[in-house]
Image (cartoon, rainbow, N blue to C red):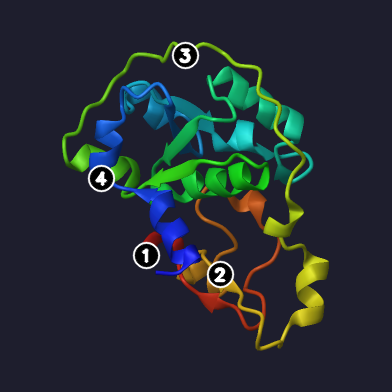
Amino acid sequence: MSHHTTAAAAALVDAAWAKEHLDDPNVRFVEVDVDTTAYEQSHLPGAVGWNWTSQLADGVRRDIATREEFSALLSKSGIGPDTTIALYGDNNNWFAAWAYWQLKMYGHRDVRIVDGGRKFWLDNNLPLSVDPPTHEATDYELPEPDFSLRAYRDDVLPRLGDPELVLIDVRSPAEFNGEVIAPPGMSETAQRAGHIPGAASIPWAQT
């Protein structure tokens, strides 16, 4: 097994692992959704809720949260540099995956995604809570972001047509084909229909 395969396997944990670590003080479960409506109805015991719209994305700059904003969110969530963060959410862990990338970009070492997300947990009648968590706040200052984990337009444009460049489009087939510009209720996140030339479609809902 290659290093990359091993790392990927370690990053994805199943519900049995999650249930076993619900009371582990070194693990912080985080539910990440486009808003916190579902989280407020029920969530994994001890989990904190992150709102993608207001806490992970900056609607004015159309960018991710700044280092200062994200550091404050992690500190408020009772997370320190040695905390194992276990992410889950709705929509096939779409927003949990965003949070995973953002955490790795800002240098947090141990981040996991709970396979199956919120839906699997509910479908299998696993433990839930409506109580707000009471984790003690920390003072966590994230390092500067690792920009090697992000490709900008000027990184991609010169390499279009390069057989060594693999572009994966994880949006829905309708978005990939230009039938719609964004998922329902999220039209502000897109400007034009279609996809980058040469990109392969692997929809997030099927992974």
Image check: 82 left or right of 205?
A: right
Where residue 46 sits: x, y (%)?
Answer: 37, 21
Q: In the rendered structure, which amino acid carries the disc numbered 4?
A: Phe
- Measuring 45% from the left and 61% from the top, which residue is drawn there? 204
Residue type for callout 1: Gln
Residue underneath mark 4: 120
Is residue 183 at all visible to an observer of this figure?
yes
Nearer the observer: mark 3 or 1; the answer is: 3
**Residue position marked by numbered label 3 in the rendering:** 135
Binning the other alpha carbons within 10 Å of mark 4 as few (below 14), some (14 to 19) or many (20 upward) gives some
CA–CA distance between discs 2 and 3? 37 Å
Residue 18: give x, y in percent of width and height: 30, 37
Q: Distance between the residues labelled 2 and 4?
A: 25 Å
Q: Which of marks 2 and 4 is nearer the N terminus?
A: 4
CA separation, marks 2 and 1?
12 Å
Q: Mark 2 points at which residue?
A: 169
In the rendered structure, are the residues bearing label 4 and label 3 in contact, judged by CB atoms less than 8 Å apart? no
Discs 2, 4 touching: Cβ within 8 Å: no
Q: In this view, does 181 lie above or below 79?
A: below
Task: Answer with left or right where residue 10 lies relative to residue 201.
Answer: left
Q: Work out which quarter of the rendered image holds the N terminus and state it.
A: bottom left
Q: How far apart are marks 1 and 4 (CA)?
A: 14 Å
- Specify few, some or many for label 1: CA neighbours under 10 Å numbering under 14, 14-19, or 20 or more: few
